[in-house]
Image (cartoon, rainbow, N blue to C red):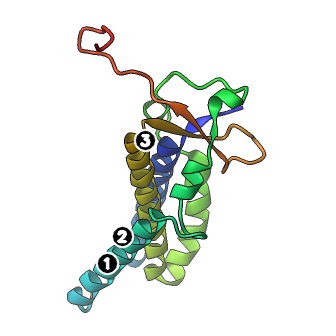
Amino acid sequence: MAVDRLVHHELRAVLSVCAALAVALTALGLVRGISAPDRPGALALYFGALLALLVVWTLLKATRLKWISHVRDFEKAVPVEDLDVALPTGRFLRDQPFSLRLFVLYLVLALPLAFWEPWTLALLLWSALDWLGQAALSAHWERRTGLLLWRGHVGSRPWELSVSRRPPTRTATGAQPV
């Protein structure tokens, strides 16, 4: 059963969606050509509004609101010691920084939408930035609590989270800190 840190899962999703977005934009540029927007100020306003919405959405997920909060899910996570799960010891984000299945899924969805209406590619950008916000929220919670969030301890329910203690850091010489 594959167990993965939540932060690594979210960052892997961001990289996969950004790669699908880059391929879709390249294909769109090759087929339709690249042209300057009619109103460049409107484009900047659109992306500024998208970014502001995402920041507000991520801050709402950091609260304890009932159907929005991710912090409540983090706090309900089952300790790994209560489960019979072996945690990975490698650096999985560095070993596997990309999810091929997610890339293909987003590419299959993005290409027809891009040729139909290029603005729909903003949905991919929204998705990538949302996952990036989720990764930042998870990393902040892990640093604040001293715990690590894991997902995938139950194969049929990968959204359920578990937590473990953060391993002690080592000094530059490899000795345990005092």
Label 1 and label 3: CA atoms lie apart by 34 Å
Lower position in the chain sequence, tag 2 or tag 1: 1
Q: Is mark 3 on a helix, strand or loop?
A: helix
Specify the amino acid type for callout 1. Phe
Q: Residue 9 carries which label?
A: none
Q: Position of residue 104 (x, y in %)?
A: 59, 55
Query: Which of pointers 2 and 1 indicates the residue nearer the eye?
Result: 2
Q: Identify the residue under disc 2.
A: 55
Q: Identify the residue under disc 1.
A: 47
Label 2 and label 3: CA atoms lie apart by 22 Å
Q: Position of residue 64 (x, y in %)?
A: 51, 64
Q: Position of residue 115 (x, y in %)?
A: 51, 78
The reply to whether residue 33 is visible in this rendering is no
Left or right, 3 with respect to 130, comes to right
Label 2 and label 1: CA atoms lie apart by 12 Å
- Image quarter where the N terminus lies is top right
Left or right, 158 with respect to 123, comes to right
Specify the amino acid type for callout 2. Val
Q: Identify the residue under disc 3.
A: 145
Judge whether 53 appears above or below 177 on screen.
below
